[in-house]
Structure formats: structure tokens, C-alpha cells
Image (cartoon, rainbow, N blue to C red):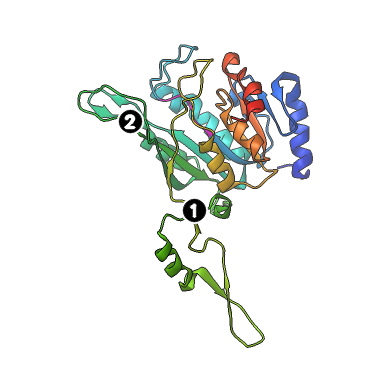
Amino acid sequence: MSEMPPDEMWDEMLDELMARAAHRTALGALVVADALDVLAELPSGSVDLVVTSPPYDRQGKYRDGQGYGRDWYEGFFLKLTAEIHRVLAPHGSFVLNYRSKRQGSERGVLQYELVFWLREQGFLFAEDFVWGKPSPPPGRFNRYLKDAVEYCFQFTRSPRWQFFPEQCLAPARWDARDRERRRKLAHNFERVSEPSGHGRRRVQAGPDLVRPSNLLLFEPEFAPNPTGHPCRFPVGLPAFFIKLLTTPGQVVVDPFGGTGTTAVAAEALGRRWLLTEADADYAAALPARLILGR
């Protein structure tokens, strides 16, 4: 890994990519290229967070005509995740949004196999988050309900991964009487030394603001979709992980950038970012989205 300071290393890295960047801001760049080729150029340990959603298995709506079956995941995708493991900082995380399709009368199990494959590559399986969609698109299946769940698997390079839940606090849902009771609980205070020899100080998260759970409730992306991208996620989803797992100025990468949702979130939160996307038409949506902030 380079001994160059992180800011200088990132600026030099962007300068090298600028010649083929489709769009760039002061914080990041979008490159229309093969993700594996671009990640291979990044210095080891230079990225704080990778958050992405690759094509789902047997996805047939992308314009490149690929089927994205099991062989694609066992081949290209595992080569890509090996590069992700290399470029992650020791404190870094890799968040994978993925949901297997149904195969006849059975739900596909590739989503679970991916967990084991990535562990074999050296990743730690830190957490599984469930993205719940309150208003999922309608489905017409003989023996199934609407598909309102997707997974976000968090993998890390080491047990020392960074974690900032205080940046994601949410209002407590308890009623006023319960909040008052919880204000008095011992775990909402820390012991401090006062002149009298005793005392207590309130700590963050008290009873009014609490850590979120690993159930994430975000509506599907219903905004206009002029590019026809089949699998967009809402800005709130990558924004949650960016806040939970990075601090301002750190580096966020999305190798399947699509229409730029991760860049929109990273830009708004003051993180440096790099996106790659193989389809120039999808990538063309990003400049307008950055202006609108959504």
C-alpha cells in the first residue's frame, strides 16, 4: 500500500482516471468502463467502503444481453470481489445488495452461496441487513406474495472495521411515559468524577434517539426512469451505509454504478467517490441527478 497521505493518493488516482471519466466533481468521478479493469488500477487499502448492487441472477432486462447466471457470479463477479478485498482498507466494509430470483417453484439460493464464497475469499461476514419495501411493486404469482424484501450483506477485511451508529440515530418510537422512564435507566448514563465524589452524565442515544436496527425500511425507487434501468435502489439505502460505515472525506466505491445513486448519496454526505458503469446510457443520468440531489 502507498505511504502517500490519503487525500493526495485519492487526488492522484482521480487524475489518472480523469482522461476517461464520463463525469467528475470535486469529490468524485464516474468512469464508463469494465469495473474489474478500473479496480485493478486502485492502490491496495485505498477504499473505505464499497456499496453496490450487481445484476441479479438470470436478469434479462439489461441491454448487454448477458444472462448473469451462476457462471457469471463464479467467474467475473468473484474476480471482482477479490479486487474489492485488495482495495479495501483494513477498517473498510463491502456492502452487497442482492436478492436471488425465483426458479420455478423454488427461491434461488445464490444469495446464500455468495456469503460462503466471499468468506472463502477472506472476507468476514459482519452483518446481514434486510431492506423492507413498504410499497413493493405488484406481483402476479400463483403461490407467492409481493416480493418486499432484499438483503444487504456487510463484509469486512478484518475485525477492526469502523462503525459510526451515532451518525444514524433515529427518533425512538416509545410513548412519552416510556421515554421518561428510559431516561432514568443506568445504561443511559456514565459515571463521572464530580467534586462531591460522585455523579452521572447523559450519554448519546439516550431514550429519545436510538440506534437503528438491521431492518431498513425504504420505499422502492419510484422516481422517473428515463434510462429504463431495471434495478434502481433509493438514495436512502446507500446513504444509510455511507453514514454508518464512513466519515466525511473517506472514499466510497460502487463498481456497478448504474444511474449513479451511490454517487448522489456520497456527494450529498461529503464523501469522496468513484463509480464505474459499463453502460454509457445509464451513466449519462448522473449529472442531472447530482444537480437535483436525488
x and y, in percent, of residue 134 in the image: 38, 36
| Quadrant of the rendered image containing residue 4 | top right
User: What amino acid is labelled 2 in the image?
Assistant: Asp
Image location (x, y in percent) of residue 205? 53, 60
Residue under label 1, please give it: 171
What is the crowding at mark 1: few (fewer than 14 residues within 10 Å), some, or many (at least 20)? few
Task: Choose mark 1 or mark 2, whichever is in front.
Answer: 1
Looking at marks 1 and 2 on the same chain, the residue that comes earlier in the sequence is marked by 2
Q: Is residue 234 left or right of residue 70?
A: right
Relative height, residue 292 to residue 151 (above, below): above
Mark 2 Cα-neighbour bin, 10 Å: few <14, some 14–19, many ≥20: some
Tell me if residue 55 is in the magenta stretch: yes
Give the answer, above or below, for where 248 lies relative to 97: below
Name the quadrant containing residue 178: bottom left
For residue 147, the mark is 2
Q: CA distance from mark 1 to mark 2?
A: 28 Å
Point out residue 28 in the picture as x, y percentages from the top left corner: 70, 31
- Find residue 256 and report its image quarter: top right
